[in-house]
Structures are given as C-alpha cells and as structure tokens.
Image (tube, rainbow, N blue to C red):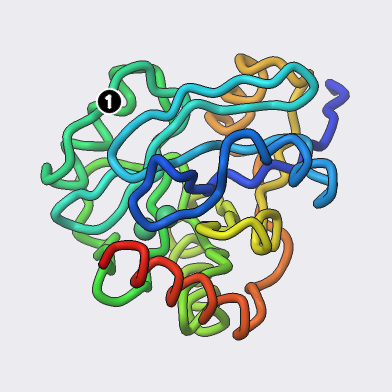
Amino acid sequence: MRDYTQFKLDIHVHTTNSSDSCINLETIPEILDKKGLDGLAITDHDKITKYDIKEKIVLQGAEISTINGHLIALNIKKNINSGMSMGRTINEVHSQGGIAIIAHPYNFPQNCNLKKLDIRPDGIEVLNARVMFCNISTSLSKRMAVKLSIPMTGGSDSHIPDTVGDSYTIVEAESDSIDDIIDAFRMGRITFSGNCSSLRKRIKSRIYSITKKL
Ligand SMILES: [Zn+2]
Ligand SMILES: [Zn+2]
C-alpha cells in the first residue's frame, strides 16, 4: 500500500477579482500561515485568477454559475462560460483535465438538483462554511453525497479574510505536486473538515458582499 500525506486545502476562496470579496492576493500567504493551511484554490466567480506562491499549494480554479447552481472547477486552464447547464459545464471542466465539484447544493436560491444530473461530478461541497443555514445544509448535502457515493469536500467560500480555513478539504496525496493533488481528487481520496463559520462572521461576510456590489 502506498503512503499518502494529508494536506489541508481551502478549495473555495474569493479574492478582490470577485465583485463581492475583499481578500487581496498579497495577503494570502499570511492568511494561510495563520490558519495552518497547506494551500487553497482561488475560485473567483466565472473567471480564473492567476496566482502562485512557492511554499503553498495553489490550485487554479473558478466558481462557475450554471443554470442549475454553482460549480467549483479546479485545475482548469481556460475560463468557462457561465449560464450553461450543470451537466455541460461539468463536461467542459473534464475536457480541460479539471475537477468538478458541486458547490453548496442546498444554498437557496442556488440549489442544485443532483438527482437530475446526467453526468457525475468529482465531488460535492458538503460543508460550505458560509451558507446561512450551514448545519442543515451540511447534513442534507452529506446525506445526498453518501446516497450517490460521491466524494465530499469542504470550503470556506470566503469573501473576507477572517473566514479562510473555517472549513476545508483534507486531501490524501503522494506529494504536494499539483498532479498528485489533482489525482487524489480524481480518485476520491478527499474528505471535508472544519466547521461552519460563526453566525457573526457569516452575517459580516454577507453584509460586506451586498454593500460592495451597490
Ligand atoms: Zn456559490
Ligand atoms: Zn463562492
């Protein structure tokens, strides 16, 4: 049996390249150190944000708005259009060698009806630390993931620095290379950990996002 190392990655983080986030790229190394994370995925809305730091794992990704809810795309090379069906978007992610994870399937109004999906995602974001009804959403998402035998992930969905790493994904990989990390996602050697962000932080994050968009 192979030896795997566990890596803690927050795979759902928005930066100032999203219209509703205030996380500056320059502050990310410090935030990751402070939160004890091995890395992250930057998942701005519908666009890739290029970023690289030597000491940490950085997955290139985006959170894509489909007509059936949000999809986290990891390890994609090119931007993917929003507004397509979930199935078509997953296909596009896979054609780029990426990993497709259904984001917050129970976050009204961005719910995703997983039973109607004709293509299998690589994961379901069971613990999204930012959704308003976080505990209920987590248990419903977990039940769905178990029923469909789809690997489970966690992510903070951070729009403010305070919440980064509140929840995260534990990845069991052969090394910290991007190829090995992506291989671990593909093989399902992933699980979620952490907690829902405190209600105070969730409210703060939402107020920030709404006012920034005004
Ligand atoms: Zn979302
Ligand atoms: Zn998000």
Density class for disc 1 (Cα within 10 Å; few <14, some 14-19, many ≥20) is some
| Residue visible at 24% across and 65% down in the picture | 113
Question: Which one is nearer the viewer's eye here, 78 or 114?
Answer: 78
- Quadrant for residue 8, please give it: top right
Looking at the image, residue 191 sits to the left or right of residue 204; the answer is: right
Q: Count how many numbered circles sit on residues in the image.
A: 1
- The x, y position of residue 74, in whole percent, is 46, 32
Amino acid tagged 1: Asn
Question: Which one is nearer the viewer's eye here, 146 or 162?
Answer: 162
Which quadrant of the rendered structure holds the N terminus? top right
Question: Which one is nearer the viewer's eye here, 41 or 32?
Answer: 32
The residue singled out by tag 1 in the image is: 79
Mark 1 C-beta closer than 8 Å to ligand 2: no
Looking at the image, residue 128 sits to the left or right of residue 85; the answer is: right
Which quadrant of the rendered structure holds the C terminus? bottom left
| Residue visible at 83% across and 27% down in the picture | 4
- The x, y position of residue 126, in whole percent, is 53, 63
Looking at the image, residue 61 sits to the left or right of residue 12; the answer is: left
- The x, y position of residue 137, in whole percent, is 47, 77
Looking at the image, residue 154 sits to the left or right of residue 84; the answer is: right
Q: Quadrant of ligand 2?
A: bottom left
- The x, y position of residue 54, in whole percent, is 74, 16
Position of 16 relative to 141 (above/below) = above
Position of 210 relative to 80 (above/below) = below
Position of 170 relative to 211 (above/below) = above
| Residue visible at 19% across and 59% down in the picture | 116
| Residue visible at 55% across and 49% down in the picture | 23
For the residue labelled by badge 1, is the local secondary structure a helix, a strand or a loop? loop
